[in-house]
Amino acid sequence: MGEDAAKVIATYFDAWKANDFTTIRSVLSDDVTFVGLLGRADNADDYVKGIEGLSQVKSDIVIHKTFVDGLDVLTWFDLHTTVAPPIPAAN
């Protein structure tokens, strides 16, 4: 089970790095929710729109560590943008 969760998150981050929003959408549940410093989304389509917007200033994503515990996955990464210094984040 954890292996599948790790594959999903790897697919998600690979797609985000490549600005492949179709693949990002394909690994999200329709009812995904997100609440964070940069916004809020209450479904997968709104979430992808937010990531598309953020990706206009994203220059890199550097993953430091991915932790997997069953179906729970946490990824520690730095989000690099063209408008601010790298931002450490957990997802």
Image: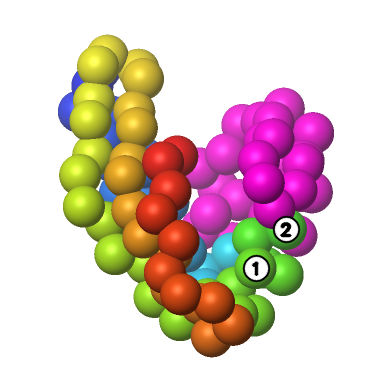
Which picture quadrant has residue 21? bottom right
Question: Which residue is depicted at the point 36% across and 20% down?
Answer: 72
The residue at the far front in this view is 85
Question: Which residue is depicted at the point 33% across and 41% down?
Answer: 75
| Amino acid at circle 2 | Gly
Q: Quadrant of the N terminus?
A: top left
Residue 38 point in image, percent of width and height: 69, 53
Q: In which quarter of the image is the C terminus?
A: top left
- Magenta stretch in the rendered image: 22-49
Question: Which residue is depicted at the point 33% across and 53% down?
Answer: 77
Decide which of 40, 70 is in the foreground and name it. Answer: 40
According to the image, label 2 marks what residue? 50
Residue 79 point in image, percent of width and height: 43, 64
Compared across the picture, whether 38 is left or right of 4 comes to: right
Compared across the picture, whether 79 is left or right of 64 comes to: right
Residue 60 point in image, percent of width and height: 39, 75
Decide which of 70, 4 is in the foreground and name it. Answer: 70
| Amino acid at circle 1 | Leu
Please tell me how crowded label 2 is: few (under 14), some (14-19), or many (20+) other residues with Cα within 10 Å: some
Answer yes or no: is residue 43 visible: no
Q: Is mark 1 on a helix, strand or loop?
A: helix
Residue 4 versus residue 38 in the image, above or below: above
Residue 70 versus residue 45 in the image, above or below: above
Question: Which residue is depicted at the point 45% across and 81% down?
Answer: 59
C-beta proximity under 8 Å, tags 1 and 2: yes
Q: Is mark 2 on a helix, strand or loop?
A: helix
Please tell me how crowded label 1 is: few (under 14), some (14-19), or many (20+) other residues with Cα within 10 Å: few
- Residue 42 on the magenta segment: yes
According to the image, label 1 marks what residue? 54
